[in-house]
Amino acid sequence: MEFLAEYGLFFAKTVTAIVGFGLLVAIVAGASQKNRQGGDKGELEINPLNDQYDDINKAMSMALMDSSVQKAEAKKRRKEEKKLAKSKKKNAGSGTANEKRVFVIKFNGNVSASAVTNMREEVTAILTQATAKDEVVVKLESSGGMVHSYGLASSQLDRLRKKNIPITICVDKVAASGGYMMACVGDKILAAPFAVIGSIGVVAQLPNFHRLLKKNDVDFELLTAGEHKRTLTIFGENTEQGREKFIEDLQDTHQLFKSYVAERRPQIDIDKVATGEVWFGSRAHELALVDELMTSDEYLTHSAKESKVFEINYVQKKKLPQRLGIAAEESADRLLVKWWGRLTNSSNIYK
């Protein structure tokens, strides 16, 4: 027990140090940017993927061609490209209005879903141009995190859905918990065969150091107004009443999560899959958690043959103090995810 107490105290000190460092860096970043006007404004990068795929195709074709015909073939292709460029210039503004466009955005989630800051700008940009005949592809990777953060991220995708713009979610590695909450907003979910899918559940855990403080004659006072302003605490003495209320809140959050998924994925048996379990892509397909087994690369290269594909990326150029703050936040995220993984015996998946 003494070892556990010392370990708990060490862990608390580590988390406190990381959080403190992050706050310090954030204060420095805020002070350095205080008098700047528009310093945090980012810019939108639009990358036509059709051209990228064409370049790859041409490079491979030329490399595999016999050297004796490479020169003649290269000359022939230059002629064809010039002819095609003239044709495009001549027909600019006519005959292309009905061509389908596919807009690709990426979301790499952490515990706080901080990528939503950029995604909201990307969604806003897409909404200025996209119509119901276009499509948005979201390359999603996330093992979940805080409920309110992923609720906001899901709501950003819902903005597209409300405008009847088709959404395809591509999961190559993981979309679990809050990540799956986002995925189920899509009209279609594609996953790699061994992508981790599911975890429709809610988890909350915290250490309690009350007995350790009591043993060392340290008093801790927590003053609240409101019966349930605080339920469980880290340093105070927890009560059975507080514990019951905390569990009640968890159950309510889980029910909201289940309702959200069931509304958007009516084809699944929600009671069967909302157990907090995760499944690999092929098993998730059997449970209707995903619609097809396919990687994002396969889907996008196929789409490029029939549509104009554009990758949309909102970029914010940050000063050194801001980058240090983000690095501190990411370090804290990794630490918390690893700790959570060890305690739930799933560190092999979420590490």
Image (cartoon, rainbow, N blue to C red):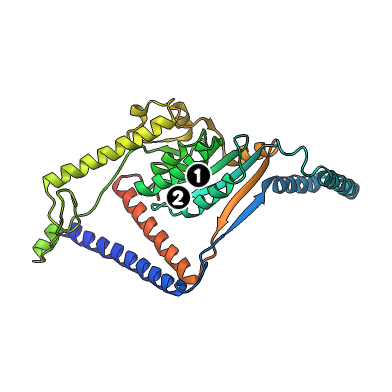
Determine whether, in the image, residue 318 is placed left or right of residue 47. Answer: left
In the drawing, what numbered circle is on residue 309?
Answer: none
Which one is nearer the viewer's eye here, 264 or 192?
264
Determine whether, in the image, residue 25 is placed left or right of residue 255. Answer: right
Q: Residue at x 16, y 45 (%)?
A: 243
Does the CB distance between marks 2 and 1 fall below 8 Å? yes
What SS does tag 1 mark?
Answer: strand
Q: Residue at x 32, y 33 (%)?
A: 275
The answer to whether residue 330 is above or below residue 49 is below
Q: If the image is split into quadrants, where does the N terminus sit?
A: bottom left
Q: Which residue has dot 2 on it?
A: 109
Which one is nearer the viewer's eye here, 104 or 5?
104
Where on the picture, by quarter, is residue 270? Answer: top left
The answer to whether residue 326 is above or below residue 59 is below
Where on the picture, by quarter, is residue 266? Answer: top left
The answer to whether residue 273 is above or below residue 23 is above
Q: Residue at x 45, y 74 (%)?
A: 32
- Of the residues shown, which amino acid type is indicated by label 1? Leu
What SS does tag 2 mark?
Answer: loop
Determine whether, in the image, residue 273 is placed left or right of residue 284. Answer: left
Image coords of residue 142 (percent x, y): 44, 46
- Of the residues shown, which amino acid type is indicated by label 2? Gly
| Any part of residue 205 in sight | yes
Q: Residues within 10 Å of mark 1 (few under 14, many from 20)?
A: many
Q: Mark 2 vs mark 1: which is more N-terminal?
A: 2
Image coords of residue 191 (percent x, y): 51, 36
Image coords of residue 327 (percent x, y): 44, 63
Determine whether, in the image, residue 91 is placed left or right of residue 308. Answer: right
Image coords of residue 234 (percent x, y): 20, 56
Q: Residues within 10 Å of mark 2 (few under 14, many from 20)?
A: many
Q: Which residue has dot 1 on it?
A: 140
